[in-house]
Amino acid sequence: MSWLKKLMIPVLILGMVGIADAKGKKSGLKGKITIINGQDITISKGKKNGGQTTLIHTTTTTSITIDGVGGKAVTDLQVGEKVVVTPAGGTATQIIATTKHKKKKTA
């Protein structure tokens, strides 16, 4: 086997593992807005003991979408809205909020 083949086999295997790993990860923080304080929002994740909270900072370049409509500002967000924030901590680059909740089916 040539030296090139010996080099390429491990590289290809590691590349496939990296792709599979990236597909399995979900990015962003999912939760509910509990506090809006200027350009900062606090997200609560989970229901036990009020859930784990994370402080998220926003800037003028943070992309905010509410119910599929982009170009929104932090002032358009409301406490209680469900959100997905990317990245999961620190300064947000994207916030996707949902005000419409799915109705539960009754039996």
Image (cartoon, helix red, strand yellow):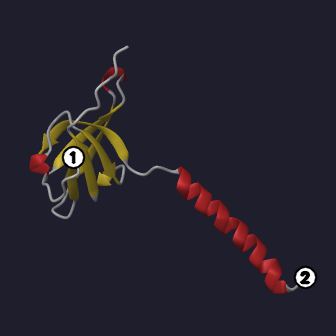
Q: Residue furthest top?
A: 107
The residue carrying pointer 1 sits among few (fewer than 14), some (14 to 19) or many (20 or more) residues within 10 Å by Cα, namely: few
The three-letter code of the residue at mark 2 reads Met
Q: Disc 2 or 1, which lies upstream in sequence? A: 2
Q: Residue furthest right?
A: 1
Q: Please state which of the two labelled residues, at mark 2 or mark 1, is closer to the viewer.
A: 1
In the visual, does 93 lie left or right of 99?
right
Residue 33 in which image quadrant: top left
Judging from the image, what secondary structure is the residue with disc 1 in? loop
Residue 47 in which image quadrant: top left
Looking at the image, which residue is at 19% across and 57% down? 70
Q: Residue furthest front?
A: 107
For residue 8, say whether it is visible.
Answer: yes
Which quarter of the rendered picture does the N terminus lie within?
Answer: bottom right
The three-letter code of the residue at mark 1 reads Asp
Vertical order, 61 against 105 (above or below): below
Judging from the image, what secondary structure is the residue with disc 2 in? loop
For residue 38, say whether it is visible.
Answer: no
Percent position (x, y) of residue 54?
Answer: 30, 41
Reading the image, the residue beneath label 1 is: 67
Looking at the image, which residue is at 29% across and 31% down? 102
Reading the image, the residue beneath label 2 is: 1
Looking at the image, which residue is at 77% across and 73% down? 9
Vertical order, 31 against 103 (above or below): below
Percent position (x, y) of residue 25?
Answer: 51, 51
Percent position (x, y) of residue 92?
Answer: 27, 55
Give the tally of numbered discs. Answer: 2
